[in-house]
Image: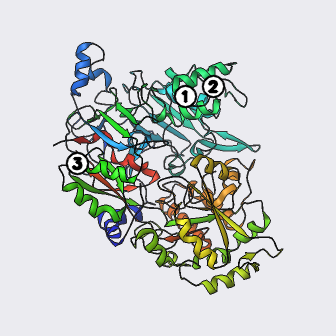
Amino acid sequence: MKKNGNKIAALVLSAAMCVSLLAGCGKAPASTPASTPASTPASTASVSTPAVPDTPVETYSEAPMLAEKVKAGSLPKVEDRVPDKDNVFVERTDANGTPLEIGTYGGVINWVGVSGWGLSRPTAESIIRFNCDGTWYPNAVKAIEHNADSTVWTFHLREGMKWSDGDDFNADDITFWYYMCHLNNFDGKRTGWKMLLDQKVDDVQTFAKLDKVDEYTVTWTFTQPKYEADFILDGDFKWCWAPSHYLKDLVPNYEGYEYVENPYWPNPGERNEEAVLTAAKKLGIDGASTKDVGKASTYNWWNCPGLPTISAFTLPANSSIKDDLCVAERNAFFWKVDAAGNQLPYLDALHFNAVSDDAQKSLLIRDGSLDVLDIDVKDIASALADINATETKAVLKTFANVNWGSTQITFNYTTPDENYAKLFANPDFRQAMSICVDRNEVSQLLSEGFLEPGQCAPGIGNFGYDEEWTNKWTEYDVAKAKTLFEGCGLVMGKDGFYDFADGTDCQIVFYTYDSPESDTSAYAVLSKYFNAAGIKTAQKNLELTAYDTVIDNNEWNACLGPHTEIGGLGLNDRPAPFVPIAQAAEWYGEYGTYYATGGAKGVKPEGDMAKLVELYEQWKATESDSERETIALQIFEIHKKNLWSIAYLKNGNGYVIVNSKIHNYADTLVYADKYQNQNIVHYEVLFKAE
């Protein structure tokens, strides 16, 4: 999603919905969602589930091509592929609560090429889904409840729900994922999904106990209360299943593998490298290490051709994200229907087309070859005029953006180089790096004036918005910046650039990465200001995987356009961007690694960094929504005080041009990780009509 903005964007943000959405992000989620499953079980204590719809769906219909397969005997009838009326999920409204049109079957939606997370955004189904106002509802599970002290959480699954190959989706798929893919770190995320961590015993991290109650019920048990904020609302808890029938013979024993005793799955025993190669071949995975196979098949599973999923669209065995045309096909066993009982999705497929550059994208959207395209705000008027002058017609859709400013820089506060560590830790240095740049000129050069000058702070309408914070350290004053640099101990050298007091060169290398959303080109603009203020800089641009490796290995000093920026809806979105609790965000570096590994690795946080962790522990351990909001604001105040990341421009909204033949695509949505970005569009309900 391209990040754009201007005064129009700000009006869209506030007028459409974002004031209520973001100001309320600290509020408790409502229990009644915009889209509802057909029924819920009785409560044992507190239940976060919707009510039974007034008009349950009694009969089902299906796409003509599927009906033909049923008639030919190659596919079970729709009633045997979809859960019954008590378990099926009925799509009734979009993420804004607007009633959906009953669609027609057929057609495809054409996107630009896909890689990495791209295929998951329009297709993945998670445990819960969010509405644009921050409320949430059970999605892939039928109901979620917890006991009185929040130590036991129960997931009720949808009886009759199936994988895309027709195999039953049940509790075995959750126990398999947990004990055979997650706790042994086969998926590479054992310590990353904090919601499943329990207490530490003798400095050893323990995990939730998962029990299979019956074929369609599982419980997660903790020794201490695990409240909603820490268990449900953490955005990383997107799914908790894997197709056991497909993967159970592919999990090898390997060096570093640690089988976790459980009553459901036996130790796979010794498996040689041939098993890994077999798994890699079956799953279409490049690379033959267990790390490659495990992460690809149980974490980034959407990119594995032929791997069964529960998504509306699946990647067949004969397709690949590397193809010039990657095709994600309709899942004949998808478990959602519309209000009239028509099995979703309406579309036959999603097509992802390899596109060489922006010029080609522009041509393809104009001639109707592409149906959906991100666009810069400055190009909207001309693009729409050109498209609507042809037989192809298009409309503009808005995605309210919630990140804290754009054109961000941040520094490695855990760098092993003492000179740089001391310099970066000094807030006067950060202030100097902020005020030595003319933001008004940067706005013109980088966005033609569409993005306004601003700081790394919540935007208007966002939770925690503070005008003083937005304007902090934004005045352009090179003389003051130099005074601050010298107050930090830097000494002007004969070459016109500052050196450290010990005479060694001070050169800040800004790491950037190749990505449509990265700020790679911004370096050319910012560097002239840094140089003019006496700070020698350089740029090192890497492929994204190499960039992330450098960050993870703590081999960097500064970056421009962090991969994980500070910002978002708030702690209810994802705590990790705001507090150092994971190996996730550049601005806290190895402080996050320390927390994530229980102190085994990384750097122990001190001062305000440690205070953030302390407040986070309080935040996740309270049931009170108002207390959580108060704590979140205290965390924001610490960010305002320190400004560990500097932004030079305010963030803006994202814009998408959509073929006007596409129906049920909401006009204004929210772009945030909490909503899995494009997933909030709900592609399963989109359809094409003349």
Q: Quadrant of the C terminus?
A: top left
Q: CA distance from mark 2 to mark 1?
A: 9 Å
Please state which of residues 627 and 445 is positioned toward the viewer in this rendering.
Answer: 445
At label 1, which amino acid type do we have? Thr
Tag 2–tag 1 contact (CB < 8 Å): yes
Q: Earlier in the sequence, mark 2 or mark 3?
A: 3
The tally of labels here is 3
Within-10-Å neighbours for mark 3: few <14, some 14–19, many 20+: some
Q: Position of residue 106 (x, y in %)?
A: 23, 33
At label 3, which amino acid type do we have? Pro
Please state which of residues 61 and 444 is positioned toward the viewer in this rendering.
Answer: 444
Q: Position of residue 270 (x, y in %)?
A: 70, 18
Q: List the single residue furthest toward the bottom.
A: 479
At label 2, which amino acid type do we have? Asn
Left or right relative to 380: residue 388: left
- For mark 2, what is the residue? 262
- For mark 1, what is the residue? 175
Q: Is residue 92 above or below residue 403?
A: above
Label 1: element kind: helix
Left or right relative to 271: residue 18: left
Please state which of residues 170 and 156 is positioned toward the viewer in this rendering.
Answer: 170
Q: Residue at x 24, y 40 (%)?
A: 687
Q: Residue at x 35, y 37 (%)?
A: 40
Label ID, residue 99: 3
Within-10-Å neighbours for mark 2: few <14, some 14–19, many 20+: some
Q: Quadrant of the N terminus?
A: bottom left
Left or right relative to 95: residue 498: right
Q: Earlier in the sequence, mark 2 or mark 1?
A: 1
